[in-house]
Amino acid sequence: MIFVPAIDPAAVPSTTHWCLAFVDGMLLLPEPEDLCLCALAEAAWQQVAPMAQVRHYLGQLDGLDCWALRLPAAPPGWRSVPLRSAMMGLPETLAGVAGRAAQVLEWDRAHRFCGACGTPTEARRGERARRCPACGLTVYPRINPAMMTLVWRPGQLLLARGPHFAPHMYSALAGFVEAGESIEQCIRREVTEEVGVQVAGLRYYGSQSWPFPNSLMIAFTAEWLAGDIVRQPDEIEDAQWFDIAALPQIPPRFSISGHLIRDTVAAMQAVG
């Protein structure tokens, strides 16, 4: 599947549409339970689209128009599903489009009024933006950069769990970038704050848009340099060194942390 983002629809719309519809932050999927998200023919689209309180064009997926819609209620034949659960069952590209739709709709909802003077904002033509007609403040969809770091030493990974993790789940360390920080500075600060160790040899792994609600996860590996684990009590419930042959439960590959941990283990095993 190939997604081509756009702000405005093409002059000739497609006759079949991808409908990324949400009710109270929940993604709508067609019934029955085993049916995945699918493109809608024109007749079905015309039943859903008029119900939309908000509509944003996203671009084209495999040549078909994609729309993000916010509805007041699920129409007959559709069910509401938590976005995270839905994305885990969708193909990667379609899951990414669903995440994009959720973030665009949340941005639109959160900026109906100017954050500087309180005046109702207006959508701008030709760009994804809302502008205040009174003071001119223009707001675009924004993301919050967050680092993720998998700390390693020969044969072991440092994994931690937060208080809101699923039972028995451990993952790499993560935290938001603060104003004035580089990613590298954030990594060193967060690792030291959360588990009390120092790291070196930062290596970029990859990134993932994370629409819960609007983050960009930027993942690295880092080699342990010094220090014993001293967890930050209000952020870290537990943190341990685990042998790569005896890891605890880790996130699925749906999240970049799942990829990061598994790929790092494979690389460590390959070099012995």
Image (cartoon, rainbow, N blue to C red):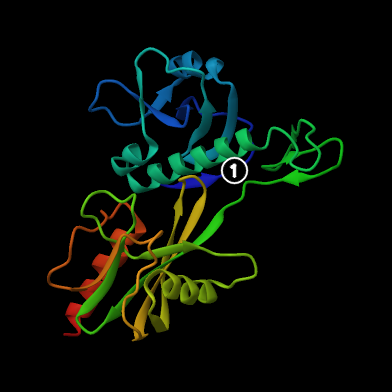
Toward which corner of the image does residue 156 lie, by quadrant?
Answer: bottom left
Position above or below: 1 against 194: above
Q: Is residue 253 left or right of residue 114?
A: left
The front one of 37 and 27 is: 27
Q: Is mark 1 on a helix, strand or loop?
A: loop
Q: In the rendered image, is residue 157 in sight?
A: yes
Q: In the rendered image, is residue 9 in sight?
A: no
Q: Quadrant of the C terminus?
A: bottom left
Q: Residue furthest bottom?
A: 225
Q: Quadrant of the N terminus?
A: top left
Q: How many other residues sit within 10 Å of disc 1, few (<14), some (14-19) or many (≥20)?
A: some
Residue 62 at x, y = what percent? 43, 41
Which residue is labeled 1 in the image? 6
Toward which corner of the image does residue 242 lie, by quadrant?
Answer: bottom left
Q: In this view, does 134 lie to the left or right of 257?
A: right
Q: Residue furthest left?
A: 245
Residue 201 at x, y = what percent? 41, 85
Position above or below: 32 against 230: above
State the residue at coordinates (47%, 38%): 63
State the residue at coordinates (19%, 81%): 155
State the residue at coordinates (17%, 78%): 269
The front one of 19 and 190 is: 190
Q: Which residue lies furthest to the front in this view?
A: 233
Q: Which amino acid does label 1 sit on?
A: Ala
The front one of 135 and 164 is: 164
